[in-house]
Image (tube, rainbow, N blue to C red):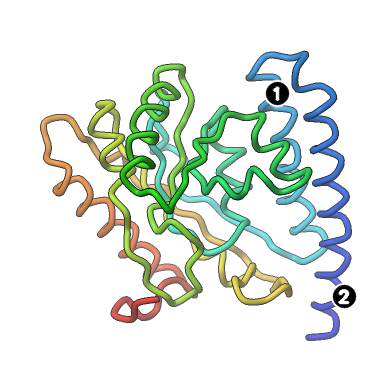
């Protein structure tokens, strides 16, 4: 089984690399000639491809619970972060969107070139104070323009079963903009492990919670509710966060 998974994963990454190069080139050639929504739709076709390719080649199926909880108006979306898989799925589910990410990602050839075309909020994590100011300024601008803002409060991918500190940037932005937080929990790390190139066949479960209101509430209260909801629901999913006491 390990050999088969290795072969399937190799085939997956060959197609994946081709897709990255193709979309990167398309974003350069066509990005300047279409408006933002068309550009986002075009570039997000890679997300569709990555999710489909992982399913067909590596057997990564998925189910989504709580679709009815997604509000009509764009808001701040928050999720635990175990792999790259959830970034592709959320990029399709909430569009157009501005993803909050580390600025190093937009410097990656082809992949970063495409990312830069869809107005991410690229932060310099070595300067926390400036990063927060940038997040609040650009985040409110993106929300006012009708874009969803997607944030992974842990700041980086956390190994399945691990426990990361939840940053408060998402809560600060939602409270400042007067929009709710939409919490999401998943167990993508069971099939797309952080510490391995191998993909493991199985079903990823994604749970979307009810929007958490921010108006008239303190940031600490909102942040505590958001963190507790995500942690509780990740632990409830098979293969989720098994040891909440351990810090990574």
Residue 76 in picture, x, y percent from top left: 38, 36
Query: What secondary structure is marked by label 2?
Result: helix
Closer to viewer: mark 1 or mark 2: 1
Left or right: 17 as drawn, with respect to 41: right
Residue at image point 42% right, 35% down: 70
Q: In the image shown, does 241 or 114 lie closer to the viewer? A: 114
Query: What secondary structure is marked by label 1?
Result: helix
Circle on res. 166: none
Left or right: 91 as drawn, with respect to 143: right
Q: Which residue lies under the disc numbered 1?
A: 39
The reply to whether callout 1 and callout 2 are in contact (CB within 8 Å) is no
* Quadrant in which the N terminus appears: bottom right
Residue at image point 52% right, 33% down: 98
Left or right: 165 as drawn, with respect to 195: left
Quadrant of the image occupied by residue 214: top left
Mark 1 or mark 2, earlier in chain: 2
Residue at image point 52% right, 49% down: 102
Rounded to the nearest angstrom, the CA distance separating label 1 from label 2 is 34 Å
Residue 110 in picture, x, y percent from top left: 78, 43
Q: How many marks?
A: 2
Q: Is residue 238 above or below residue 27?
A: below
Residue 5 in picture, x, y percent from top left: 80, 77
Q: In the image shown, does 99 or 71 lie closer to the viewer? A: 99
Residue at image point 57% right, 27% down: 96
Q: Is residue 111 above or below residue 28?
A: below
Left or right: 213 as drawn, with respect to 235: left
Residue count near mark 1 (Cα–Cα under 10 Å), binned few <14, some 14–19, many ≥20:
many
* Quadrant in which the C terminus appears: bottom left
Q: In the image shown, does 72 or 14 lie closer to the viewer? A: 14
Q: Which residue lies under the disc numbered 2?
A: 7
């Amino acid at each position: 089984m390990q050999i088969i998974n290795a072969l399937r994963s190799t085939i997956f990454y060959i197609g994946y690399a081709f897709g990255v190069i193709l979309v990167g080139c398309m974003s350069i050639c066509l990005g300047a000639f279409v408006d933002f929504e068309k550009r986002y739709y075009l570039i997000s076709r890679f997300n569709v491809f990555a999710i489909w390719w992982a399913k067909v080649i590596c057997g990564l199926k998925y189910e989504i619970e709580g679709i009815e909880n997604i509000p009509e108006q764009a808001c701040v979306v928050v999720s635990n972060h175990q792999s790259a898989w959830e970034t592709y799925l959320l990029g399709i589910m909430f569009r157009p969107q501005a993803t909050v990410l580390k600025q190093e990602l937009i410097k990656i050839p082809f992949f970063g070139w495409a990312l830069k075309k869809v107005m991410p909020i690229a932060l310099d994590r070595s300067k926390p104070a400036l990063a927060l100011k940038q997040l609040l300024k650009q985040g409110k601008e993106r929300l006012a323009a009708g874009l969803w803002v997607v944030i992974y409060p842990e700041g980086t991918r956390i190994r399945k079963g691990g426990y990361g500190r939840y940053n408060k940037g998402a809560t600060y932005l939602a409270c400042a903009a007067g929009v709710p937080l939409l919490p999401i929990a998943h167990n993508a790390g069971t099939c797309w492990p952080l510490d391995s190139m191998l993909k493991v066949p199985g079903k990823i479960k994604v749970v979307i919670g009810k929007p958490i209101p921010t108006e008239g509430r303190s940031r600490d209260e909102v942040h505590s509710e958001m963190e507790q909801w995500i942690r509780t629901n990740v632990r409830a999913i098979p293969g989720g966060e098994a040891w909440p006491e351990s810090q990574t």
